Amino acid sequence: MSVRFIHTADWQIGMKAAGLGNAAATVREARIHSIERILRLADDQGVDFLLITGDLFEDNAVDRLLIRKVGDLLGRFSRPVYIIPGNHDPLVPGSVWEHPVWAEASNITIARSADPIELDRCVLYPCPLKEKYSTQDPTAWIDAHQTEKIAIGLAHGNVEGLPEAEPDYPIPRDAARRRGLDFLAVGHWHSHVPYPDPDGSVRLAYSGTHETSKFGERDSGNVLVVEIPGRGATPVIECVPTGALRWVSSRHAVNEEGSLEDVLREVRTIENPEAVLLRLSLSGLLFTSDRPRLSSLREIVGTRFLFGAVEDEGLIPAPDDDAWIETLPGGPLREAAVRMREQAVSGSDEQARTVAARALIELFDLKEQSGT
Amino acid sequence: MIVKRIGVTNWRGFLDPMEMGPFSERLNVIHAPNGTGKSSLFEAMRRALFDVHHVGGAEIEEIRPWGRKLSPSVFVEFSEGGNTYRVEKTFMDGASAKLFQEEEGRFQPIADGRNADTRLREILSADPPGRGLCRQEHWGLGQILWAPQGELALKQISGGVGESLRSALGMEVSGASGSRLEELVEARFLEFFTRGGAPKKGKNAAPVVAWQQKQETLEQELVDLREEHRRYEEASRQVDDARNRREQARREADALRESVAGLRKAAEEYVRLKNEQVRKKEIAEIARERFESIGRTLEEIKATRETIEGLEKSVATLSGENEQAKADVAAAKALLEKTRTAREVARRRRDLITEKQKTIDAARDYHACRDELTKLEQRLERLEEHETELGRVKKERAEMISPDPAKIRELRRRLGERAAARAALAASQVHLTLTPRKDCEIENLTDAGKHTIKGGSPTVFSGDEVVEVLIREFGSVRASGPEGGADAHRAHLEAAETRIKTLSQPFGSDDPDYLQKRREEADALDQRIAALRKQIEMVLDGDERDSMVGRRKELKATIDDFEGQHPNWRSAPPVVGLLQTEFETFSRDVNESVASAEDAFERSQSDHAAAEKRQVELNGMLKAGQGNLETAGKRLKVLVDDGLSDNDRDKKRSEALMAWQAAKAGVEAAESELNSIPGDPARELEKLEKQRQVMEEEVAHSRDQEKSAEGRLQALAARGTYSRLAACEESLAEVADRIRRESLRMEAIRLLYETVRDAKGALLARVTAPVEESASRMLARVAGPRLGRPIFTQDFVPDAINPEISAGPVNLQNLSGGEQEQLHLIARLALADLLAKDQRQLVVLDDVLNATDSGRLRRVLSLLEEISERLQIIILTCHPERYRALEGAEFFALTR
């Protein structure tokens, strides 16, 4: 008798999205919309239930309307949902788990204690977190060796080997085997990470967040569809994308005249830009002839994308590109331009170089403006 | 430009047309006394050249002649750029402007009205004012070349004059296009900063300021939200704590309830055993009471019997002692009566002490009376003597008649008058002195008197007007004198004598010395009378004579009374000291005997009381012993009234002892059973019960706290703090990014501006160097090398000097007034010399060099002469003599 379910975690509903400007609200909203895709996926896949292994909410003090909205969404779902509180939304007084929406939804089970939940074909071993930090293994209580049904653990913490300075809720890498579990569904890490046993079978995995939450986050925006054929059988895991937004962080070093054209071209080819958050970092040399391209780049990135930022402080005027300076009237202006160009190239620190480069750009703009 | 002629009409003080010129192309001195209008002439030239003719306002009104509605007009003829022009302007009413150019020796009009104004400015390269009259900054090159009165110091140069100077030096700093771009740079800089480099504030502040304010607001909001979030988490912990506490309290309460139930059973068993123990103890106590009661009865019978025996002996002894005590009381009573009598006798002698004291007092009074009587009689005797003497002297004084001093003084005056009258009379008469050799008779025929005159004795015969005597045997002798005058003297004489007689008649003499002596004698008597009266007053000492006599009678009567009572005092007056000694001896004896008698009485009285008391006590004891004996007898009778023998009673006591011992064994058994329970569980039960109640209350209290904390938590949770916190942090990040970008842009603009400014400054410093060099040479010629090199700003304004001996530049304010004046003149001349490179320029110096000494003035004049090769110089002064040494100068005397 097999069991088929969706493992997801770290929805971080209500999370802050600093530095995204007006896109922050859209980013937050997208995390809720993705839930609907997960539920449709669950229906499509015909899973038995949904497991959410912690950090459904970013914080226990999120807006109560968000809790209501998420609770209603899950409550309308036709299949059982099992949730454990994570370190962001631990089971404490006043937590999101005291909201009445959970009691209203008959299909939702909030695991409030570390006690097995026996289902028809499997037994769930939930490990709810009741505080934000702990050095104890949340799965330590589990002993499923004697269980005849498929044993599935739900936990939230740091699997050994993750780059965490402090052992916060540490989970042994072989926790599934050690506790007698067929599969241990883990949350906390936003990227999908499977932990194969020596025989290659994966019994412990991070599903990762369902919707990417920041720039540079790898393998996120997925859920896991897990099927366990029977007690002791190897789980079959499928990583299915659910995220709607793409977070693109792109670095470009431009050192030749016209190089910005390549960047422009690349940016133009990004599909569905209204669902893309783009952070473009430029470094290298800025040639006079490239200045219009830089302006175009700024305009495209700033207007077409859900969020776009061009970090061009790393650009310095090209040392040999002094043609426009020669067109300046002789005297103090040209003298000043030469001085600033030297400072932009070989200033004492990055800030000084950046300021000098920007000053040159200002002078260039004024020159254009004056028609000199 | 150089000026050739100038003329004004209706210009301030110039009512009539005034014209001056042609001027020399080199040196000109216009001189006039103060108030003549030199500066007005200079002003008229400026207004003609730079002000539009239709200018209005209060300031232009001031150039009208005072109190008149006349329209001021001016003309100036000048050369510029190789052409000669004439401008004519009339201001205010009928304002007009005409510009002429000299062509073939005649001035031909080339523009009028506003066109004339515009054309003129073009010729002179002047900057028009926005509105109103032009000011120094609109004068073009005149800013440098023309020094108005009191404004020799060059403060600033405006417009394109600086560029003209640089052009004259052959150096272009920025050029026109560069200047425009520099202006844009500066304008961009001023969008964000003040000229001093500080970020702008207020309504014109840079956008970053608003962003920073928003950042501050958001940061404060973030702090508040974090605090709210912290309170939410704290509330969560409080709820958790409260729940834990309540759960703990509940567990403890449950445990306590179980303990209380177990302890309550033990306590009930303990109470049962305790009651059993009490009951058995009561039985044992009753048995013990019975045994001891029988024992006490037996002991009491025995003791009563012994008591009766002892009491009988005691009553007998007390009876004998009682009789003896009665006898002692009688003897003591007799002795008491005896001592009482002796005490009364002794006390009666005390009366004699009083009598003796009275005798002593009487003796003192007696002596006092006698002493007073003696003194009184002595006083009366002296009074008698003084009164007798006073009567005698009074009588003598009454018998003595003496004039008063006034009369004596009048008498003396009258005697003098009489003597004078006599002398006058004698002088007015005829006197005939006859001294016969022998006695003879002479008949005075004048008064028919006959006189016998002894020989050798001169005799005088006097008469009024004539004296005639008949000398016997000789004949008559007649002497005569002047007629009249004697009668008046005689009348005076008679009056004096009459008054003398009146005055001296009571005293029998008209000798004033005699009368004076009598007066002194009378005065001595008066003094004696006064002395006696004084003595009498002293003797009386305030008393009356009659009272003294009365007192003497009283004293004598008192003395007689004393002597009547004590007859022996008449012959032998008492000695108080002896009487006092006797009294004291007697008094001491009496008091001692009284004290002795009283002591004896008190002792006998005490003895008597003691005897009586003893007798009463013995009597009481006897009666008590008899009573006790009777009582003991009755008690014994009661004790033995049980119908038992002594042996029966002993047997009964043995039975009671056995019963008591059996009961004690029962008590010990009960105690042993009770001791098997450690302590009374009731106290522990009570303690636990209290603890249980406290714990129940704690549970309730914890529940209340939990509910309260939950309420707070729910309220805080409902606020969705984190969502607001997230939104706030997002806004803050956005604002911070905007600030970072704005700050970067501002820093870049600042760098651009400052770099351009510094570069320009360095270039300008190179531009001013030739001017400084020229001025330095001129200054050295005038003031010597001490002042060193003048330093100009980038805009050619003298700013400081750099003396040779100074480590750095020195502010011009540190120069003397004369040296400042010379330096400012030289600065203008150096710049003017520079501007005159292409064509001759007009320099106007209005009333300058007033503080320059004659030595340096001569050097300045030499400099002016030299520089006038390239400049037209017009000097306005009220001291023409100071400029007479100027070689080739034209002098113009200004008059109205």
Image (cartoon, coloured by chain):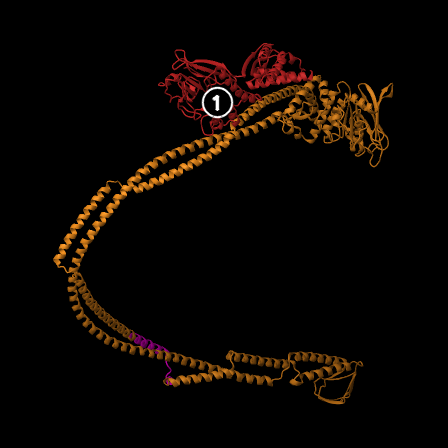
Chain colours: A red, B orange
Q: Secondary structure at mark 1?
A: loop
Closer to us: A36 or B383: A36
Q: Position of residue A307 (x, y in %)?
A: 57, 18
Closer to us: A372 or B106: A372
> Can I make out residue A85 in this image?
no
Q: Is residue B307 left or right of residue A215?
A: left
Spot the residue most to the left: B647
Closer to us: B263 or B239: B263
Indicate yes or no whether the magenta region holds residue B581. Answer: yes
Occupied quadrant, residue B499: bottom right
Occupied quadrant, residue B96: top right
Q: Position of residue B741 (x, y in %)?
A: 59, 21
Tell me the amino acid under the disc marked 1: Leu
Q: Which residues are magenta?
A: B569-592
Q: Is residue A362 left or right of residue B10?
A: left
Q: Position of residue A96 (x, y in %)?
A: 48, 27
* Residue designated by label 1: A56
Q: Give the prevailing secondary structure in the magenta stretch.
A: helix
How packed mark 1 is, by other alpha carbons closer than 10 Å (few <14, some 14-19, many 20 or more), is many
The quadrant in which the N terminus of chain A is found is top left
Indicate yes or no whether the magenta region holds residue A34. Answer: no
Q: Position of residue A45 (x, y in %)?
A: 48, 15
Closer to us: B666 or B169: B666
* A237 to B417, vertically: above or below: above
* B626 to B515, vertically: above or below: above
> Can I make out residue B45 in this image?
yes
Subunit bearing disc 1: A
* A299 to B223, vertically: above or below: above
Occupied quadrant, residue B617: bottom left
